[in-house]
Amino acid sequence: MTTPTLDRCEEPLGRLARGDMSAFEEIVKEHQSMVFSIAYHYLHDRSLADEAAQDVFLRLYQNLASIASPRHLTFWLRKVACRRALDMARRLPKAPPVSLQDIEEPAAESADADPLLSEGLRRMVASLPKNARAVVILRYQEELELAEIAQILDVPLNTVKSRLERSLGILREKLHRWSGGVTR
Amino acid sequence: MNPWEESLREALRRKAAPEGFADRVLARIRELPVREKRPWFQLRAFIARPALRWAAAVLCLAIAGSVAYREQQERQRRQGEIARMQVKQALRIASVKLNAARRMVQQVNQGTAQNRL
């Protein structure tokens, strides 16, 4: 799990409370990857994800007084990132269904073990129903427990379980079709 | 996690934010309307601090406790005052009765003395 350590974040929060704005920059740099990735995996659009992530940090700046601890900060950022991404997705015109034949060969060198499969999976995740998408992202990007996801999304645990099961079913089926019936 | 879920985890690994992301965030913050810096907003932000909320809750409890204590003291003082007045009244009545009895005794004594003479 890549949650920032408490020590690394406690200090900037304390400095921020004393009015040191350079501490805010440290907080942004510490969490930008997490917030951007949630938005990117949700929207599958770098510029939209960039905008959504900026909005999240702007909202953080306006609500700094309500942040009680580094743990609360991470929880808050995940929650607001999911909500912001969902808001943006709702405003977007309905995307056409993803055809896996549309997936291009990655041009740049990628860190993924199988870049084509990874890109395909990312597109499939971005095409999941909006409420289910956040569950998959929080489960596999942030590697959170289902109870934590339920807290962040403010839904019952059973809802999280059913959304995750349904999403994995959809993804498995799409992947199965894509791989020509050869399951991994 | 099975291999399939492992692929999903791999695909959804965190990505680095675009170059200059933090700078763009800070630039947008600098462009925020001035109202955010007005005293009322600063006061509101100050009040919203969790530690201050706890302090306010403790202060409210202390004030409520103090008021209840004072009420109790006042009630006891009033009850004491009533009891004191009742005791005084009882003493006054007892004094009147004793005086009457003393007078009667004196009259009886005087009558006996005249009879002897």
Image (tube, coloured by chain):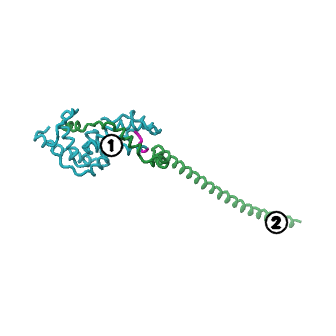
> What is the letter of the cyan chain?
A
Is residue A88 covered in magenta? no
Give the residue number, with chain letter if any, for mark 2.
B107
Q: Which mark is residue A100?
A: none
Q: Which residues are magenta?
A: A65-69
Tell me the residue at 36%/36% (across/down): A29
> What is the letter of the green chain?
B
Q: Which mark is residue A53?
A: 1
Between A180 and B18, the residue placed more toward the observer is: B18
Q: Measured from the top left, where is residue A158 in percent x and y? A: 26, 48
Between A128 and A161, the residue placed more toward the observer is: A128
Q: CA distance from mark 2 to mark 1?
A: 110 Å
Residue B19 left/right relative to B51: left
Q: Amino acid at mark 1?
A: Ala
Residue B99 left/right relative to A10: right
Mark 2: few/some/many CA within 10 Å (<14, 14-19, 20+):
few
Q: Quadrant of the C terminus of chain B?
A: bottom right
